[in-house]
Image: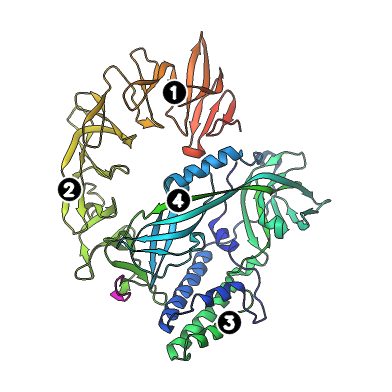
């Protein structure tokens, strides 16, 4: 399935309502917002309104960065670019893509004035072909050993009324994907259609530009638009915007909403409300019946193509498969400092709140402050930054002279604060140097958390070698040339004499690779190597041959598949095999072989065809 690219400004607009309303009947969004204030003090309500004001201001500033620079333009026939047909992915592939996305997902805990928010994140989630699942919390486990049962929809940015550091959350992840589509064809002579009783209308075709209006079920289920020129040639799409009706006026709607929130804040400052009930009533009275944050069920799609459009096809999901999984999400960068960076809506400056008291511990006085780790921060503008270490005992930011970059939640990579001095050491959260500033580069292995410190040795037999250190600064292995990171609990290394091994995290040599060549790290439980005859095969984690040496070339396994080449007499044949060595795509002659992308985005080119990450022909 071709994953649709949407401009981020559109992602914001999709959440926003379409029209300002003249009635004072509150919308469901306003009702829900007012309900959140139940049981809170006026000071707590003020903090929440300040945060709402800041959020709306951020939307206004962000959307102001985008200008509608696309205008319809006429294409010469020779300048038109052909597009590719749209199709939904095979259900089995989508299921595997979601399982992959959920395999390494965690969350980032972000802080506000008296609350925190949890944002799901993970490598496979970011680069995968699946949309982000909906995560709803069931149990929240704090670092202090306490737990809390609370239902928070993380996709809706619901807040947790706590600043305590969270270790993990038990969530229910749900997802869905289309298994059946309806295709609606429109042109200037046939510009209207019906989908399950709701209207789809072609509003305008002008050269390379198309606008389509969709109601209710059609708008909710919209997947893709394809366009064709007068000769029936499919055209490449360059961009599209999907937004609710009236979305063109979203800046006005946001500004009106912000003005109401600011008026409520001014009344709070004056002491105009005797209690929470009075404030809640005023919010319900002053907010219109439709706000910029209400859900909508009708809208439009604008699209631009590389050619002159004569007719279009609209793809709408007509059947979906839903999945559900209970999963524990872990905090990717837990903050154990006790002090949380927060921004002040009015000034835009940053300070720190004490998690224990909920009060400001470091005043709002830092502009353009951003967090590097929970203990290190920087402000300024590129290329000049001032770096700070958070002194939790003194409750202040202490300027440091070094340039620092994140290694882990409690360690940073430090170098002299000059661009030309690109040598690094490791600094702890206490500001002490764990490793001196004498390395070309430093990384932390994601699986073992060991420190890889690379040092250049121009006069030696190797261009650069890596020593592996534990979290106390003690060397546990090396110096070696390392390949990749620890996978299947093993790391591929080569010593100065040219001998290669797989070592374990304690530095022990587990697999001696003498007699093997072109070694690769483990992938899906197998490591690719060649034998003395130049044939490719794979070893298992015990150092035994897992797949025999019978290929002219091969690739690392990706989602259980490897592209392999063999010689059949004088003919070169290519296939895809799985981790047991079984053939998934049969051998056939191939003039050009290639792989592109990783994980679920992998594409295999062979046999004059293209195959996706699961071996299905595209």
Q: Is residue 211 visible?
A: yes
Whichever of labels 2 and 4 marks the residue nearer the N terminus, that label is 4
Magenta stretch: includes residue 357: yes
- Label of residue 472 in the image: 2
Which residue carries the number 1 mark?
Answer: 554
Out of 198 and 573, give the one closest to the viewer: 198
Q: Which stretch is magenta?
A: 354-363
Dot in front, 4 or 1 = 4
- Label of residue 327 in the image: 4
Helix, strand or loop at label 1? It is strand
C-alpha distance separating marks 2 and 1: 40 Å
C-alpha distance separating marks 4 and 3: 38 Å
C-alpha distance separating marks 2 and 4: 33 Å
Whichever of labels 2 and 1 marks the residue nearer the N terminus, that label is 2
Proximity of marks 4 and 1: CB atoms separated by less than 8 Å: no
* Residue at image point 33% right, 66% down: 164
C-alpha distance separating marks 4 and 1: 35 Å
Q: Kindly give the residue lying farthest to the top in the view shown.
A: 569
Within-10-Å neighbours for mark 4: few <14, some 14–19, many 20+: some
Dot in front, 2 or 1 = 2
Residue 366 drawn at (x, y percent)? 31, 70
Residue 538 drawn at (x, y percent)? 39, 22
Q: Is residue 58 left or right of residue 198?
A: left
Whichever of labels 4 and 1 marks the residue nearer the N terminus, that label is 4
- Label of residue 284 in the image: 3
């Amino acid at each position: 399935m071709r994953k649709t690219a949407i401009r981020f400004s559109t992602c914001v607009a999709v959440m926003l309502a379409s029209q300002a309303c003249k009635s004072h009947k509150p919308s469901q969004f306003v009702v829900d917002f007012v309900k959140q204030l139940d049981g809170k003090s006026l000071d707590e309500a003020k903090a929440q309104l300040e945060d709402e004001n800041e959020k709306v201001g951020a939307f206004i500033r962000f959307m102001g960065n985008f200008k509608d620079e696309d205008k319809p333009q006429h294409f010469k026939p020779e300048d038109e670019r052909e597009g590719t047909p749209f199709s939904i992915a095979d259900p089995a592939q989508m299921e595997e893509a979601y399982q992959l996305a959920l395999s390494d997902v965690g969350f980032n805990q972000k802080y506000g004035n008296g609350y925190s928010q949890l944002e799901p994140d993970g490598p496979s989630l970011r680069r995968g072909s699946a949309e982000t699942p909906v995560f709803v919390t069931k149990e929240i486990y704090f670092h202090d050993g306490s737990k809390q049962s609370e239902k928070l929809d993380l996709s809706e940015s619901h807040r947790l009324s706590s600043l305590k550091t969270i270790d993990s959350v038990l969530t229910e992840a749900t997802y869905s994907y289309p298994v059946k589509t309806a295709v609606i064809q429109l042109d200037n002579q046939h510009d209207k259609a019906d989908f399950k009783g709701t209207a789809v209308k072609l509003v305008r075709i002008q050269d390379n530009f198309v606008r389509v209006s969709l109601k209710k079920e059609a708008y909710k289920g919209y997947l893709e638009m394809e366009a064709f020129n007068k000769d029936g040639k499919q055209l490449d799409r360059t961009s599209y915007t999907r937004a609710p009706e009236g979305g063109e006026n979203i800046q006005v709607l946001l500004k009106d909403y912000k003005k109401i929130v600011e008026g409520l804040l001014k009344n709070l400052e004056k002491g105009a409300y005797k209690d929470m009930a009075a404030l809640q009533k005023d919010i319900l009275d002053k907010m219109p019946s439709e706000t910029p944050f209400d859900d909508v069920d009708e809208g439009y799609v604008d699209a631009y193509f590389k050619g002159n459009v004569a007719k279009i096809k609209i793809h709408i999901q007509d059947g979906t498969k839903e999945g559900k999984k209970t999963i524990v999400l872990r905090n990717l960068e837990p903050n154990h400092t006790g002090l949380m960076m927060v921004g002040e809506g009015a000034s835009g400056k940053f300070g720190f709140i004490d998690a224990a008291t909920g009060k400001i511990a470091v005043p709002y006085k830092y502009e353009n402050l951003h967090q590097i780790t929970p203990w290190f921060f920087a402000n300024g503008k590129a290329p000049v930054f001032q770096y700070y270490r958070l002194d939790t005992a003194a409750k202040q930011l202490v300027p440091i002279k070094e340039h620092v970059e994140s290694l882990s939640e409690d360690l940073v990579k430090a170098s002299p604060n000059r661009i030309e001095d690109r040598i690094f050491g490791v600094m702890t959260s206490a500001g002490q140097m764990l490793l001196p500033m004498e390395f070309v580069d430093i990384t932390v292995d994601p699986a073992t958390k060991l420190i890889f410190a690379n040092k250049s040795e121009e006069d030696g037999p190797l261009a650069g070698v890596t020593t592996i250190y534990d979290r106390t600064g003690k060397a546990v292995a090396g110096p070696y040339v390392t390949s990749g990171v620890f996978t299947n609990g093993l790391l591929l290394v080569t010593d100065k004499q040219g001998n290669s091994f797989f070592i374990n995290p304690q530095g022990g040599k587990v697999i001696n690779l003498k007699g093997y060549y072109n070694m690769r790290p483990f992938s899906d439980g197998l490591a690719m190597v060649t034998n003395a005859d130049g044939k490719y095969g794979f070893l298992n984690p015990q150092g035994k041959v897992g797949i025999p040496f019978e290929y002219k070339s091969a690739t690392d396994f990706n989602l259980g598949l490897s592209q392999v080449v063999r010689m059949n007499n004088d003919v070169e044949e290519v296939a895809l095999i799985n981790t047991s060595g079984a053939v998934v795509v049969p051998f056939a002659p191939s003039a050009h072989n290639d792989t592109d992308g990783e994980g679920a985005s992998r594409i295999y080119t062979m046999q004059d065809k293209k195959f996706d990450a699961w071996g299905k022909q595209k």
